């Protein structure tokens, strides 16, 4: 069963703790993306990676970090430096070649208490 | 029923009616546009896309229209069904040189009344 998986679906953390969100894909996609979504709003790009061992900051990278050690995996760490981390986090990947279509995972809802 | 721009975030229609969701985009250099459907608590789902060298593209019950002159994109849903109730986002690819980054609109909440 192919696709993009994100785990866990719900995550609770205490303020001041770092937390890592998982994103895995078995679609053989090269590019992967992390977005943040706040209630009633659109998606904002945090980080993206076009290829293994390479990634770039998006529009709201402050307080976040990523790694891309494997093609299949693009974990996102929400650090204690992120001022307002409670949000819905979405991972996406893009078909190889010239297409721009991104496909999304089911999301992780992070709540910082 | 029809939504107008990004300043009307909700659209309510009767089951069986046609729906039109509108989107104004910002960059005249954008060459790719895409519509997503997002149900509550789920990730966005691809609906249909269009490149800037086209004015219209049809899918199953959906049509996307692109007017480059006024930088306007619309999604038409025929015979709207209760299962179409969701938030619909348009997105544009502003730059091919930066990893095919998509910029998303704020979304329109479509509610289909039985």
Image (spheres, coloured by chain):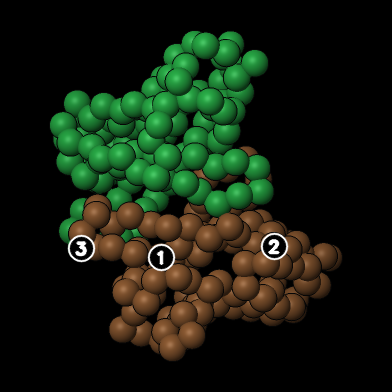
* Callout 1 and callout 3 share a chain: no
Residue visible at 60% across and 41% down in the picture: A38
Instruction: Report the chain shown in brown.
Output: B
SS state under label 2: loop
Question: For this rendering, which residue is in front, A58 or B89?
Answer: A58
Chain ID of residue with mark 3: A
Chain ID of residue with mark 1: B
SS state under label 3: loop
Q: Position of residue B108 (x, y in %)?
A: 65, 62
Q: Is residue B103 left or right of residue B12?
A: left
Label 3: few (<14), some or many (≥20) within 10 Å? Answer: few
Checking the image for residue B92, the label placed there is: 1
Q: Which residue is mark 2?
A: B9
Label 2: few (<14), some or many (≥20) within 10 Å? Answer: some
A6 in relation to B107, above or below: above
Corner quadrant of residue A101: bottom left
B18 in relation to A71, above or below: below
Label 1: few (<14), some or many (≥20) within 10 Å? Answer: many
Q: Which residue is mark 3?
A: A98
Question: For this rendering, which residue is in front, A103 or A26?
Answer: A103
Corner quadrant of residue A12: top right
B108 in relation to A71, above or below: below
Q: Is residue A48 left or right of residue A103?
A: left
Quarter that holds the C terminus of chain A: top right
Instruction: Report the chain shown in green.
Output: A
Q: Gap in Å between the C-alphas at discs 1 and 3?
A: 15 Å
Q: Position of residue B76 (x, y in %)?
A: 59, 78
Residue visible at 53% across and 25% down in the picture: A83
């Amino acid at each position: 069963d192919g696709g993009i998986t994100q785990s866990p679906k719900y995550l609770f953390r205490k303020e001041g703790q770092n937390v890592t969100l998982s994103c895995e894909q078995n679609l053989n996609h090269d590019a992967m993306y992390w977005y943040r979504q706040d209630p009633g709003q659109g998606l904002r790009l945090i980080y993206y990676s076009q290829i293994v061992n390479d990634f770039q900051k998006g529009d709201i990278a402050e307080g976040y970090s990523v790694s891309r050690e494997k093609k299949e995996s693009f974990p996102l760490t929400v650090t204690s430096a992120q001022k307002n981390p409670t949000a819905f986090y979405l991972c996406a990947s893009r078909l190889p070649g010239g297409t721009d279509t991104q496909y999304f995972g089911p999301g992780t809802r992070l709540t910082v208490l | 029923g029809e939504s107008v721009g990004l300043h009307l975030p909700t659209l309510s229609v009767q089951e069986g009616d046609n729906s039109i969701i509108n989107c104004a985009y910002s960059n005249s250099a954008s060459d790719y546009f895409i519509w997503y459907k997002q149900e509550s608590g789920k990730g966005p789902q691809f609906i249909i896309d269009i490149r800037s060298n086209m004015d219209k593209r049809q899918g199953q019950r959906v049509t996307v229209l692109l007017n480059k002159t006024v930088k306007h994109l619309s999604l038409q849903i025929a015979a709207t069904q209760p299962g179409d109730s969701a938030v619909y986002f348009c997105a544009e690819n502003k730059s091919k040189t930066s990893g095919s980054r998509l910029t998303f609109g704020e979304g329109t909440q479509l509610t289909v009344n039985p």
